[in-house]
Amino acid sequence: KNETVLYLAYGSNLSNETFRGKRGIKPLSQINVQVPELRLTFDLPGIPYVEPCFANSAKRDPEKDAEGMGTWGRCGKDEKSPLLDNSSRRREKWHKGLIGVVYEVTAADYAHIIATEGGGSSYKDILIDCFPLPTASPWDPVPQNPNTEPFKAHTLFAPAIPPGEEPPKDGGRFQRPDTEYAQPSARYLKLITDGAAECNLPCEYQDYLQALQPYTPTTTMQRLGQFVFLTVWGPLIFFVLLGGEIFTGKDGQLPAWLKELTAALFKAVWASYDGFFKPLFGDGERTIDDDEGAKVPTVRSRGRTLLRKRCLVDVERATEKSDR
């Protein structure tokens, strides 16, 4: 019996380079969806100075989530407004739920997806209601409240630890004190923004993704800290990742002892960052001023203009294919 699984992707697995290329997944079908119960976050700790955090999702209360879209119009409606303020701690907000792609994959491919996403050491498998987007055109706005017929899909979810509670001892979620502080690397963000364009996700959502500020080492001490940090911790992290490839089970899950080892290693990694590396070398989670005190340039209208042009090209190509 050839069983298939519906899998919701919203992070780097949107990218063909990652999903079909490096991970070798061959989707049988796919559809763009809106998930009002979830919202996109970047609160999974990674490696300081290199990959400070990774994408995750969190529960969303549609009634409490603000309805205003701020600067997010239809593919950058207001080109002259700055996309972000680097002096601000706020994360750019999106108020219409999680946008992603549901892939239909084989059971074997889904086990491989779980294995490549940490083998259960961080994410947990949940079922969530997904609403197909009402139109295939990325130019059309995303509804505040979807009214299409929902269906269930699996996704990988790492719920935040309630305040005052300790991380689970059997691996699982590890989090920083301020879950909204860290910024994803430029490399990681590019995978998501490229994937969103490749999947023809709504332009206004692509605008939001393009506006997210990546982590960039801007001082000499940060760059030195990056080198020293990788020299000290790189071999151990590589060893654990290699162990994951060797000992992953057929269901994609890591054995309990390796989950515990992974959790202990990353706890030590971040303890060394907080106690030694950050005081000496500077911030390894968030972009700061450069050595001369100048602000990191904001991403302005050029990115939005290019995004709009790309969306238009995608629409034109889709139209040409439908006419054949």
Image (cartoon, rainbow, N blue to C red):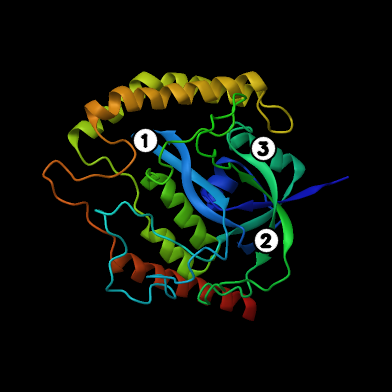
In the picture, which quadrant includes the N terminus? top right
The answer to whether mark 1 and mark 2 are in CB contact below 8 A is no
- Across and down, in percent, residue 156 comes to 63, 44
Tag 1: amino acid? Val
Mark 2 or mark 3: which is in front?
2
Q: Residue 112 has which mark?
A: 3
Distance from Cα at disc 1 to Cα at disc 3? 25 Å
Residue 83 visible: yes
- Rendering quarter of residue 35: bottom right
The amino acid type of the residue labelled 3 equals: His
Q: Nearer the viewer, mark 1 or mark 2?
A: 2
Outermost residue, right direction? 1
* Residue denoted by label 2: 130
Report the mark closest to the observer, 1 or 3. Answer: 1
Q: Which residue is mark 1?
A: 50
Q: Residue at x 30, y 60 (%)?
A: 84
Looking at the image, tell me whether mark 1 or mark 3 is earlier in sequence order. Answer: 1
- Foreground pick, 117 / 73: 73
Q: Are there few (<14), some (14-19), or many (20+) residues within 10 Å of tag 3? A: many
Q: Secondary structure at mark 3?
A: helix
Residue at image x 68%, y 30%? 253
Q: Position of residue 90 (x, y in %)?
A: 35, 54
On screen, residue 91 above or below 123: below
